[in-house]
Amino acid sequence: MELILPLRMVLLALLLGPTVAEAQTFLVPRVEVGGHVGWIGAIGACFCTLPMLGPRLTVNLSQQNALEIAVETLIPERPAAYGLYFVQYKRATRSPSHWTAIRPFYTVGTGGYYNHDRIPERRETRPDGAVIVYPAHSTGEVSRLNIASVGGGIERGLSRYASLRLEGSGFVILDSDDGYFAYRVLAGVSVPIGGYRASTIK
């Protein structure tokens, strides 16, 4: 009789264990910040590829829907900064029970390009010996929304406070005379403000 009660409790715990695990639901925080590195390529007038990197901000509207802003700086051969920015809707295809599960998603959005160049100081000597100094200055431009993009990827939690993200997308420049198609392949990390949580459904 003394062994029957502990055995019953062990059996009950084993039976209820999967039920409790299934009753967990994965909860994302309102805001996630992150960054990524990758490659961007163009198919059109030329087949060009360049490495790039940049930050990303995700605002979770619900457990499966989010709005994202990403800024990506291309790494050129000369000292200048130019790249792309994206505003996109992200939809997770399912809501897993734990942050370690793989979370597939797709994205649709728009964006544009930007550039920033710093012109160094230049000195020019005139025939009469006078020196004309052209001071250093910067130039920059941010385009209007002229990109249409669609893509997808997966996320998986590394811990409660970080997740790995792999994604790819294709996009077109809507007002380009050349009419080329481009693509991005990215790998990055997201940091949830407040951490990922699990809520028990009763």
Image (cartoon, rainbow, N blue to C red):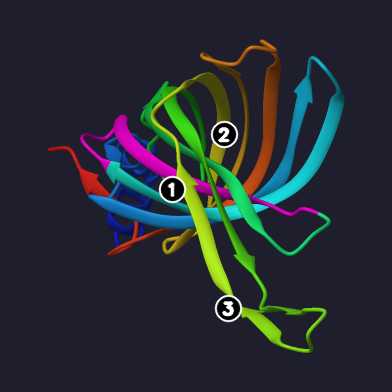
Instruction: Mark 3 or mark 2: name the one nearer the start of the chain.
Output: 3
The residue labelled by disc 2 is 154
Q: Quadrant of the C terminus?
A: top left
Label 3, label 1: how far apart the Cα atoms are: 54 Å
Disc number lying in front (3 or 1)? 3
Distance from disc 3 to disc 2, alpha carbons, whole Å, reads 48 Å
**In the image, residue 13 lies at what x, y percent?**
34, 48
Local packing at callout 1 (Cα closer than 10 Å; few below 14, some 14-19, many 20+) is many
**Residue type marked 3:** Pro
Q: Is residue 133 above or below residue 17?
A: below
Q: Earlier in the sequence, mark 3 or mark 1?
A: 1
- Residue 25 point in image, percent of width and height: 29, 39
Q: Quadrant of the N terminus?
A: bottom left
Under circle 1, the secondary element is loop
How far across and down, in percent of the image, does residue 4 sit? 32, 52
Q: Quadrant of residue 79?
A: bottom right
Report the magenta residues as a range: 60-76
Does the magenta stretch mainly form a helix, a strand or a loop? strand
Q: Residue at x 64, y 12 (%)?
A: 177
Question: Which residue is the site of mark 3?
Answer: 135
In the rendered structure, find residue 99 and report the number of the disc placed on it: 1
Q: Amino acid at mark 2?
A: Ile
Is residue 65 part of the magenta span, yes or no? yes
In depth, the one of 23 and 76 nearer the eye is 76
Question: What kind of element bears circle 3?
Answer: loop
Q: Amino acid at mark 1?
A: Trp
